[in-house]
């Protein structure tokens, strides 16, 4: 498996589902009228992050990401996930 395939799988199987789950939680807060201005700002931030990961997937499909870039992004994602836990 290439680094690009590993990154694609990581984004599809972990990153995007995590973002979608978190967005669902935020929307539930807003729907229950417990959301604040910060909640709405967090929604906008997470939607932007979701868009960026989808654009990254497009770049991966088009072969625009080198091995070095793919490894750096994988390392960053792993670091972000370890901070979350």
Image (cartoon, helix red, strand yellow):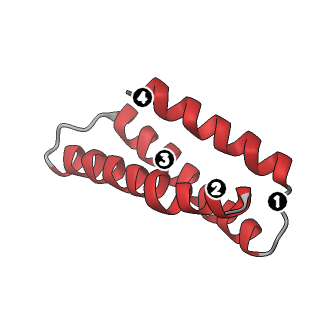
Image quadrant occupied by the N terminus? bottom right
Q: Mark 4 and mark 2: span between their CA atoms?
A: 19 Å
Near-viewer residue (33 or 2): 2
Give the quarter of the image for residue 66: bottom right
Give the quarter of the image for residue 3: bottom right
Earlier sequence position, callout 4 versus callout 1: 1
Q: In the image, residue 51 lies at what x, y percent?
A: 59, 60
Badge 2 is on which residue? 7
Q: Residues within 10 Å of mark 3 (few under 14, many from 20)?
A: some
48 vs 29, left or right, is right
Earlier sequence position, callout 1 versus callout 3: 3
Discs 1, 3 touching: Cβ within 8 Å: no
Q: Mark 4 and mark 1: span between their CA atoms?
A: 26 Å
Earlier sequence position, callout 2 versus callout 3: 2
Going 54% across and 54% down the picture, which residue do you hit? Answer: 10
Badge 1 is on which residue? 65
Badge 4 is on which residue? 84
Give the quarter of the image for residue 60: bottom right
Q: Give the label on residue 46, or none.
A: 3
67 vs 23, left or right, is right
Going 24% across and 46% down the picture, which residue do you hit? Answer: 30
């Amino acid at each position: 498996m290439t680094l690009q395939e590993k990154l694609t799988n990581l984004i599809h199987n972990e990153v995007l589902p995590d973002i979608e789950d978190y967005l669902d939680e935020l929307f539930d807060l807003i729907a229950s009228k417990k959301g604040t201005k910060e909640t709405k700002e967090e929604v906008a931030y997470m939607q932007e992050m979701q868009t960026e990961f989808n654009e990254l997937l497009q770049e991966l499909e088009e072969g625009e990401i080198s091995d070095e870039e793919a490894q750096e992004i994988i390392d960053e994602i792993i670091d972000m996930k370890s901070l979350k836990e």
